[in-house]
Image (spheres, rainbow, N blue to C red):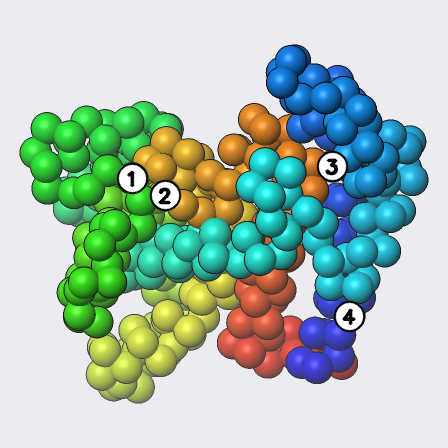
Amino acid sequence: MLRRLIQRLLISIPLILGITFFSFLLMHTAQGDFLSSMQLNPQIDQRTIQTARSQFGLDRPWYVQYEKWMVQILHGNLGYSFAFQEPVGSMIGSFAENTILLSVTSLGIALLIAFPVGIFSALKRNSWIDRIIQFISTAGMSVPTILVALLALLVASRTQWFPIGGRQQVLISEMSWGENLLDLLHHLALPALVLSINPTILYIRQVRSNVASVLSDPFMTSAQAKGLHPARILWAHALRNALNPIISLFGFSFANLLNGAFLVEIIMSWPGLGRLTFDALLARDLYLVMGSLTLASVMLMGGNLLADLLMAWNDPRIRRASV
């Protein structure tokens, strides 16, 4: 396990370098930067803008700027945000925390719903209940997340059941610890439910397919012939053998979850990394965009790494193959 972890971490280094390099290059294909918009303001002296551009190295070629930025990263400095007037590192931490909170909550909702529904559908396979579940999951896969988010905003504005935008109320200092937690959950509920729809459907289909396939294997017939309790057959044999494809799906679904989280954050005004990156792109805030993209890439690779480690933990064959 340790050797597998070290190998994956070493592979991640050139991946991060490639992502940051091409992201930096794409950012410089667009004309202008944050200081360019300030040149249209007659109240700002042009010499002040040129001084600021020279101070931050924006007057140099893009590859020189990239090299300087990478050296800063090695020293723990992600750069300076021109739009928000503060270091990037101190900004993105709280926004990344909100994105992780939204993604993990959505994944938890998806797993809590998908496993019992998928197992029940597999046990009742080819019945009318199974066909209804399959129809709903197929129909749900065709509904885009952006449409669900817009419909959720419409319902929230009409019913006033959920707050629209933000993570908590403004006057949280006047609330107790329990009231703060309830207020956070109230703000989190709607974005998390919207984001959990696609992974829930994906996991229902995968759990149903895997469990149904394992239940029809010969060793399951042998377990039944030995007189084992049906619950033990299901949980100790069928589900354990059906977990590997589901765990491997975790890396893929986590990538989709992060992409969906960015979209949901923008539409529903959840203060996460996606919302921050969108605002930074509009402001042409180079280092804030690069810091957000780098952190998002690290989170994505971390999700895939966790999926690999879970597969190795669940299947001894994978552990032996990695030795």
- Tell me where residue 72 appears, x and y as whole percent: 80, 56
- Tell me where residue 290 appears, x and y as whole percent: 68, 43
Instruction: Report helix, strand or loop for mark 4.
Output: helix
Q: Which residue is mark 2?
A: 270
Instruction: Report helix, strand or loop for mark 2.
Output: loop
**Who's the residue at 28% across and 27% down the image?**
150
Q: Which residue is mark 1?
A: 165
Q: How far apart are labels 1 and 2 at the CA level? A: 6 Å
**Who's the residue at 73% across and 58% down the image?**
77
In this view of the protein, can residue 155 be seen by the observer? yes
Is tag 2's residue or tag 3's residue first in the polypeptide sequence?
Answer: 3
Q: How far apart are labels 4 and 1 at the CA level? A: 41 Å
Q: Are marks 1 and 2 in contact (CB under 8 Å)?
A: yes
Tell which tag, 4 or 3, sits nearer the viewer: 3
Instruction: Find residue 303 and name its label.
Output: none
Quarter of the image where the C terminus is located: bottom right
Dot 3 crowding, Cα within 10 Å, few <14, some 14–19, many 20+: some
Is tag 4's residue or tag 1's residue first in the polypeptide sequence?
Answer: 4
In this view of the protein, can residue 26 be seen by the observer? no
In the rendered structure, the answer to whether residue 322 lies left or right of residue 162 reads right
At label 4, the amino acid type is Gln
Tell which tag, 2 or 3, sits nearer the viewer: 2
Find residue 217 and report its image quarter.
bottom left
Q: How far apart are labels 2 and 4 at the CA level? A: 36 Å
Instruction: Find residue 7 and name its label.
Output: 4
